[in-house]
Image (spheres, grey):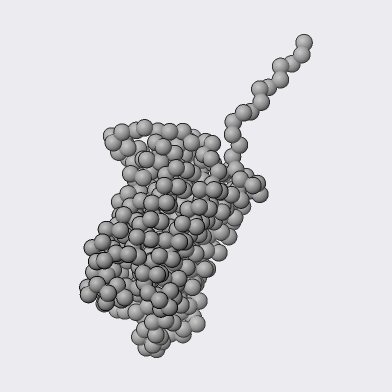
Amino acid sequence: MQAACPAPDRRPQLIEAGTPAFVRTSLAMFAGGFATFAMLYATQPVLPKLAAEFAIAPAQASLSVSIGTAALAAMLIPASVLSDRIGRRWVMRLSLALATLAAAASAIVTDFTQMLVLRMLLGAVLAGLPASALAYLGEEVAPGTLGRSVGLYIGGNALGGMTGRFLVGWLTDLSSWRIAFAATGVLGLIATIVFWLCLPESRHFRASRSGPLQLLRNIGQLFADTGLRSLFVIGFLLMGTFTSLYNYLGFRLHLPPFSLGQTAIGGVFLLYMVGSFSSAWTGQLVDRLGRRQVLWVMILGCGIGLVVTLADNLAAVLAGVAIFTFGYFGAHTTASGWVSRRAAERRALAAAVYLSSYYLGGSVIGTLSGFAWQHDAWPGVATAIAVCVALALVAAWHLRHLLPVGSAVTVTSAA
């Protein structure tokens, strides 16, 4: 009797490192991440120009940054729900295209109210990309390659944040902020074209049509998972410490013994290049060693860098900031990829909750640490950051012993 041959496996294959699909995915995600942060923070380096142009106070001018990030945070969960219904790829494509239009339109506003409306719209529509990106990677990329893919995406975030700020500042000095904003629109257009052409089709996406009550239940189930809850807290703390560091570093470097000018202080943002390298390298390290062994080490690196910044030597301060930045981007890469991996079929919603926690941390801790600056200048800020880093480190240390989802637990009692 002839043995029956097993049926061939017709399931779509996951994307593996080294394949053409991996190259296309990496290029698309890097371009998307780059454009997201380049457009989102475009107004930050020209706030004084905007204040003078529209005859408004500096605090009002700063709304052009905060209203965009606030809108993004508010729309992350709705965008993830849309992503679950119509697909990750379409949501990300539309997100980039619409954000590019809003970014370009910012160059032709006639009053500051129009600017705020456009920046709010930009943040709102841009939410679709970060809300869907990690879910897409978690569904389409092989587990052993996922860390590398997430690292390249977040590396694009870092490089975009740095390049966007410097491009806008440089072009504003050469011409005007309107030309600079138009240039960010061109950057967004290029990224959108690359993204549309390169990102492979979703082959493992399964549509979900849960209603509001089911959404609340799903969020509750995410928070019921100890691992995800800890990762959400770590995201909140990480972004809070990073925002605080860069918010008040400029104030410190402007004062004696450094007494740096504004141009030199702006050069500190070049250290974002360290973050771009860290994200890509950490992604590969995660694939080799595992998230449990990498996350706490990267957070510890943030603490070490923070201590170095307490020196009164400029080279030491910059070295400390570089170490902190390296650790921060490495930890964020590891934590965000872990959320996507652990949440399984709820990965889009989990990514949205993680990023909402992440941006909320930047807003809350970044603001509260200002009171620490008023109380004790840089030592006060460093102390506040150190507390947050310590809490994140404790959470990451406990995650070393986290059981995989679905693992059986056998409890034995000693007599």
Classify the position of the C terminus by image quarter: top left
287 to 44, vertically: above or below: above
Residue found farthest to the top: 1
Position of residue 328 relative to residue 414, above or below, is below
Q: Nearer the viewer, residue 319 or 36?
A: 36
Q: Seen in the image, is 274 located left or right of residue 214? A: right
Query: Residue at coordinates 46% horizontally, 85% vertically from top-left?
Result: 313
> Which x, y percent locates residue 338?
48, 49
Residue 293 placement (x, y as % from top left): 54, 55
Screen quadrant of the N terminus: top right
Figure disc tally: 0
* Image coordinates for residue 134, horizontal then vertical, percent: 47, 48
Which residue is nearer to you in this view: 359 or 1? Answer: 359
The residue located at (33%, 52%) in the rendering is 124
Q: Where is residue 382 in the image (x, y as percent from the top left)?
A: 37, 73
Q: Is residue 362 above or below residue 407?
A: below
The residue lying toward the viewer, choosing from 277 and 324, is 277
Q: Which residue is drawn at 48% across and 36% down?
A: 205
Residue at image location 66% in from the left, 22% down from the top? 7
Asked if residue 393 shows in the view, the reply is no
